[in-house]
Image (tube, grey):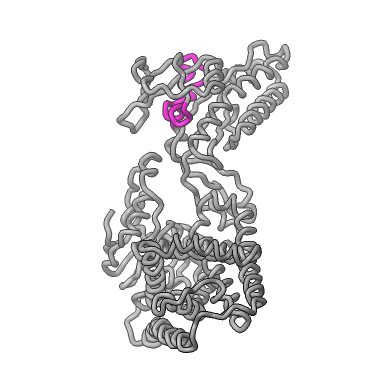
Amino acid sequence: MATGQQGRTGGEPPAKPARNAKDTAQKSVSSGNWRQRLRLWSGLVLFAFCLTHFANHALGIISLEAMEAGEDWLGGLWDNPVGGPLLLLAALTHTLLALWRTMRRRTLRMPTWEFVQLVLGLYIPWTLIPHVAATMGLDNAHGVDVEYPLILTLLWPQGAVMQSILLLVVWVHSMVGLHFWLRLYPWYQRSLPFLSVAAILFPLLALWGWIEGARRQALNTAYVPDVTPAQIDWVYAQTDQFRALIFGLIAISLLVVIIRVSTRRFRQTVTVNYPGEVKVRAYPGASLLEISRMNGIPHTAVCGGRARCSTCRVKIIESAGELPAAETAECEVLKRINADESVRLACQLRPNADLTIRPLVPVQQAAVRSRQTADAYYWGVERKVAIMFIDLRNFTGLTEQNLSYDVVYMLNRYLDTVSSAIRQEGGHIDKFIGDGIMAIFGMNVSFETACQQALAACPRIEDAMVGLNKDRGPQFPDPLRIGIGLHGGSAILGRIGSAGAESAHAPITALGDVVNTASRLESENKALGSVLAVSSDVLKAAGIELPDAAVSEILLRGKTEPLQIHALRDMDQLSLALSSGTPLDRNAGDRLAPHPHHS
């Protein structure tokens, strides 16, 4: 796609052909530009240190000896030629990038969570610097053996309150950052209740542990700290110097923002036209997302303006001049969604000329605050799943030959019975399509497990149909027969039609190439005279071999490579393979039989 945007008027250009799910899966989820990725990874390194350090504090609940034993283990993890420099580099990188991001702000209007994270992040150095100077500084500069007895003695009781506040502030800052990084992942949404409990209990245990350890150390009247008053004065001097440096940089960052705000009246403005004849004036340098926020215009931005999603995207209807070129992070997101040249991310585009836009994810202010917008499926989640299509054979003939009430009764029994069999193996019913059923496997498990569950559901469905046919009644002389199509791959899972207050209850459905292929495989059963048509992709992922199945290839519309499928007339072989755990036959392709049907 083009990285720039020329001025234009008129309608949208023709859309590009959509990429299939397999191609989409080859691209990882964007994590923003290189600065955002560095900030993320440096933050994760710091969080790993905090996690181990706080866990060591919690050992104080047991004894001082346990804390010291844990400290020896931590020393091997972080106090070495790799861990020490990595931790220091992560701290410097995270701090400097946070200051850089603050300096680039054109407004201090931001979501509450972003404000909390910013304020807590600015507070941390105030209490963390003396702690670092006392622990790392005394050891490196004066050779003092800094262990728990010394630190606890120096902190208790005068520094107990400040140290406890520091622990909580660091933890809350970390939790806010982790939450808004992980909230789009479906596994995180499912695990959120358990993770919330852990996020509350863990810092409480750390507080309990270090305070209990300090109290026990205070009772040891025979202990004399191995540190001189001169060394303590050195710690205070180093603290003042580093505080002056860090908070000088913070002051400069805030001063830059203030200067921008106070001098913008002397700079040329740009006009942004929104739908509904809403027109606002802004100063060059702010992003479109910031312009919307400054003027109270609701604008969706799930990732917080980090180019990790496409929910803030806008269509450029008209531009008075050439807009700034998109950077790599924005290009990756727009390419991923097959956006044309008129689409840009509001969080990344900083307009320098008048323009007219239309947000492509319209939102009302009430929806911005609604809890359903935090649901990952509200925006769509890409995941490798197994898709199953089931269709009832000769359903039209049944409706013509029987009373309508009898048909409805039998159809409901069929749908209930088969759906129950699917759910028992971990499947999710996507939708009912007349006498057809579409099911998803793998929403909560790995792709390999999803394929195993989907295959295991097939014999269970056949058993359910046998029981249903026994009780079908004389009005249905012919047994009910079904065809099953099964394929796996990447799909987009989302709550389609999730508008209004009940959106959190909207059903989850799957979209993508894998769905169309699974439906096509179900139709192939008619030509093959089989009850199950399953792709080799599913069998390979599940580790199942079906040596006696009829193997063929079909060419799908829009594909250059044929798809290998296995067809079964009954489920006996599949049941045997599932029970024995037979490994996948890698040479199955040698027994290919030609198939005459192509799309």
Q: Residue furthest front?
A: 222
Measuring from the top left, give residue 197's x and y in whole percent: 64, 58
Image location of residue 228, percent across then percent down: 49, 86
Q: Which residue is at the front of the view, 366 or 253?
A: 253
Please state the horizontal and vertical placement of residue 238, each as a whole percent of the image: 42, 84
Provide the residue span drawn in magenta.
Answer: 517-543
Q: Is residue 456 left or right of residue 90?
A: right
- Is residue 523 within the magenta segment? yes
Above or below residue 15? Residue 84 is below
- Res. 218 image quadrant: bottom right
Q: Is residue 443 visible?
A: yes
- In the rendered view, does 296 fall on the left or right side of 256? right
Whether residue 106 is in magenta: the answer is: no
Q: Nearer the viewer, residue 497 or 117?
A: 117
Camera-side residue of 564 and 73 = 73
From what the image shows, is residue 536 above or below residue 350? above
Residue in the foreground of this view, choosing between 54 and 101: 54
- Give left or right: position of 348 versus 526: left
Quarter occupied by residue 169? bottom right
Q: Is residue 302 visible?
A: no
Image point (56%, 68%), residue name: 172
Quarter containing the C terminus:
top left
Image vertical order of residue 510 relative to residue 580, above or below: below
* x and y, in percent, of residue 287 in the image: 38, 70
Height in image: 36 above or below 248?
above
Write down the quadrant of residue 65 in the picture: bottom right
